[in-house]
Amino acid sequence: MNSSATAQFGGPGMGGAQAGPSGGGGAPGPAERAKFRDHIHNQDALPIGREKGDKIVASVNVVGNRTISENVILQKMQTKKGRFYSREVLLGDIHRLNEMKSFDHVTFKTEETPAGVEVTYVVHERPAITQLEFHGNNRVNDRDLKGRAGLEVKDPLSEFSIESARRRLIDYYKEEGFNQVAISSTIGFKDQPGMVIFRINEGPKERIASVNVLGNSILSEARLKKIIKSRGPFMKLGYYISNVADIAKIDRDVDILAATYHNLGYLTATVGRRISYDETGKWLSVTFVINEGKRFKINSVQIIGNQFVTEQSLRQRLELKAGDMFDGSIMKRDVGEIIYGYGELGFIYADVKPQTVMRDEENTVDLVYKINEGDRWKIGQIRVNIEGEPHLMRETVMLNMLEMREGDFIDRRLLEIGQRRLTNSQLLETNPQIADPPDIIVEPRKDAY
């Protein structure tokens, strides 16, 4: 690889999807039909192959099973009566039994007899759930709770799975506005050790009475309320519509507001929230408190990691420059421009990570673009994916419309131009309700440049 930065970008272009090994910005080609031999090897049956050994399996038995039938267990086994005995195959059977997750202990015994080797699998079944009960739920029915818990009768019974189900139920209740919910779980009741009971104290269903914003001066309260997801009543008309109090959603709104300010250059802005309840405990008011801070200016723009492309060529694509106020939206566009430029040169997996470094000077920041160019790729094969019956002539005509050729470096700009030409050619149906539009499939091959 040439360590000197010699290449330059072409003119700025519009962003687009990167071409990858599965296709240049388009969907991958049609899947190949699985071969029969691969299908057979993917089944639980014995793989096809020549058996080896000098001892015959005289019998195969299972002991210790209570609810799982011996037939179900033996179907998983590759050790069969009348086949050659193999300890490796036997250990594989133990592994397959453990993968069933129905046993907490599996072992085996063997005994040599004149007729051959007698194999016995010794299993210890996990306790199973025999019954699910929900007590105390008045606002949510058993069916919804059972679906959210993710438990079924005959599932293996374990404290971990029961605790996970309890936490899922709490999360579900809180999403529905029951923020004071309390749920406990019990395993076993009287003579039913497999019964699982969830005792629920739902508490009141909480709704948002009002949403307020304090401390904002740059952005209006109306604009900030449109950004967040939490809502109060709609003009007193929809007093019980879309205003369920989801505390997790309110906390996410705090992050949304902070990110909005950071994106505008207020990199030290902080956002908090206050919640107050009315006398009933069912209605709450949410207040977001914003400390905007000062807007930051860019002291310098630095580019590191580029080897193939010159820094001057990279800077020509950047909109943000030293002396400008920081703007996260423009920074994201600049990152896209750099990645797109690399894509025109065949670096289809180039990656750019922007970083901001606070300086000692007040309210200034250095903007650093860290570039990982990756490898440069050439076109290995170009195909046109056409829905329906294959048609060699139509595919040939479409390939002739492209400016790309096999062996050229992948150029995402030419790839997008070719895609538009195919769409506008009217040679094929482009109505998505009738058929999928034609798509260019580019298979890259790695080449030294």
Image: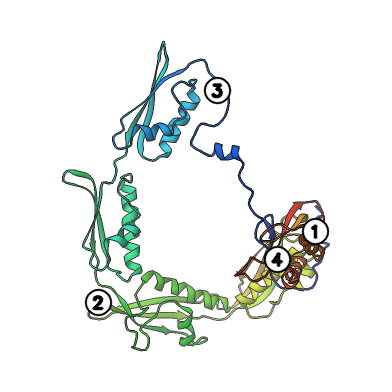
Upstream in the sequence, badge 2 or badge 1?
2
Query: Which amino acid type is marked by label 3?
Result: Glu
Disc number for residue 281 = 2
Disc number for residue 262 = none
Upstream in the sequence, badge 4 or badge 3?
3
Q: Which residue is mark 4?
A: 339
The alpha-carbon separation of the residues under discs 3 and 1 comes to 51 Å
Upstream in the sequence, badge 3 or badge 1?
3
Q: Residue at x 47, y 85 (%)?
A: 216
The alpha-carbon separation of the residues under discs 4 and 1 comes to 16 Å
* Labels 3, 1: front one: 3
x then y, percent, for residue 15: 69, 71
Query: Which amino acid type is marked by label 2?
Result: Gly
Q: Secondary structure at mark 4?
A: helix
Q: Which residue is mark 3?
A: 51
- Left or right: residue 391 versus residue 131 is right
Upstream in the sequence, badge 3 or badge 2?
3
Disc 1 crowd, CA 10 A, few/some/many (<14, 14-19, 20+):
many
Q: Secondary structure at mark 2?
A: loop
Disc 4 crowd, CA 10 A, few/some/many (<14, 14-19, 20+):
many
Quadrant including the C terminus: bottom right
Q: Residue at x 44, y 74 (%)?
A: 254
The alpha-carbon separation of the residues under discs 4 and 3 comes to 55 Å
Q: Which residue is mark 1?
A: 409
* Labels 4, 1: front one: 1
The alpha-carbon separation of the residues under discs 2 and 4 comes to 53 Å
Label 2 with label 4: CB-CB less than 8 Å = no
